[in-house]
Structure formats: C-alpha cells, structure tokens
Amino acid sequence: MKRIDLPNKKKKITLQIWDLGGEAKFEGIRNSFYAGANGIIYTFDLTRRFSLMNLSKWKTEIERVIGSKPSVLVGNKLDLVKYDNERPIPESEGEKIKEELGCSYYLETSAKEDVRIDKAFLKLSELILNTYKPLDY
C-alpha cells in the first residue's frame, strides 16, 4: 500500500501495489492479480535490452483481463547508466516505447537511489483520478 497526496486536486489516493514476476511460472496466477486494477506501471531494466522484449506481451495479457487502463512506463536502474554515454537503452528509445504501448508518461528511475519513484506513482495516481470518478460516500 502506498498513500499519495495530490496537492493540486486536494485529494489523497491509496494504491495497492503488486510487483508481478514476468517469468512463465507465474503466468497462471497473474490474471487474478490484474482484476480490479485501475492503473499499470510497466517497468523495464535500463541495463538489459532483453527486459523490453516482453512489454507488449504483458500489455496484451493485462488488457485481455481488464481492458485498457491508465499507464506509465518506467525505465529503472538509472543509477547504473546515468553517466554512460553508450547506455544499452537511450532515453529516446524509452519515449518511443511509451508511444508504442500507449502509456501517458515515461520516467527513468532508480529504486536504489530513490530517484523519481514517488513521481512515477504520483503520475499514475493523477491519471487514475482523472480517468475514474471518485465514489461519493
């Protein structure tokens, strides 16, 4: 669970976050985790080109279960490539993949150094709030 304050909207939103393994052995259980999802963060490893290969497959798998949802694309492990002029996946390629997947934002993050992690969740929260009408209780 992660609580996000949206100061511009004067709202707070609570996210329930699932980090689902992409390995084939988890394929049978992933669908049950997709149910009820209102947004998606697609993540790949900036140091490993092969981590891009399954993004479109995951998107298809998710949309088959829950349809199209607001989404953000995140390239992680920025700490390992930020000073690399010959990085495996340039930022421009991440932007291109964002367009191909239909994601609203592309961010490069470092979970290790806590760089733009909160921003990724904030952007997703804003997308969710703009897409779904909050329930009145």
Image (spheres, rainbow, N blue to C red):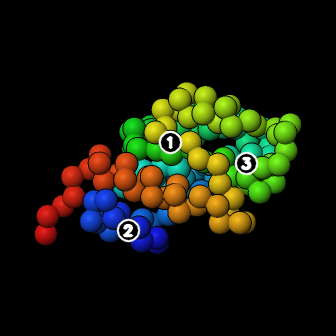
Question: Residue at image x 50%, y 42%?
Answer: 105
Query: Residue 86 appears in which quarter of the rendering?
Result: top right
Estimate the spatial distance between the alpha carbons at disc 2 and disc 1, rounded to whole Å: 19 Å
Q: Earlier in the sequence, mark 3 or mark 2?
A: 2
Q: Which quarter of the figure is the C terminus placed in?
A: bottom left
3D distance between C-alphas at marks 3 and 1: 16 Å
Q: Is residue 86 above or below residue 127?
A: above
**For the image shown, how many numbered marks are present on the structure?**
3
Question: What is the crowding at mark 2: few (fewer than 14 residues within 10 Å), some, or many (at least 20)?
Answer: some
Query: Can you say whether 91 is above or below 113 in the image?
Result: above
Q: Residue 62: where, in percent of width, then height?
A: 49, 42
Q: Sequence-wise, which precedes: disc 3 or disc 1?
A: 3
Disc 2 residue type (three-letter): Asp
Which of the two discs, 3 and 1, sits closer to the camera?
1
Q: Secondary structure at mark 2?
A: strand
Q: Which residue is mark 3?
A: 45
Residue matched to label 1: 105
The kind of residue on which mark 3 rests is Asp
Say which residue label 2 marks: 5
Q: CA distance from mark 3 to mark 2?
A: 27 Å
Asked which secondary structure carries label 1, the reply is strand
Secondary structure of residue under mark 3: strand
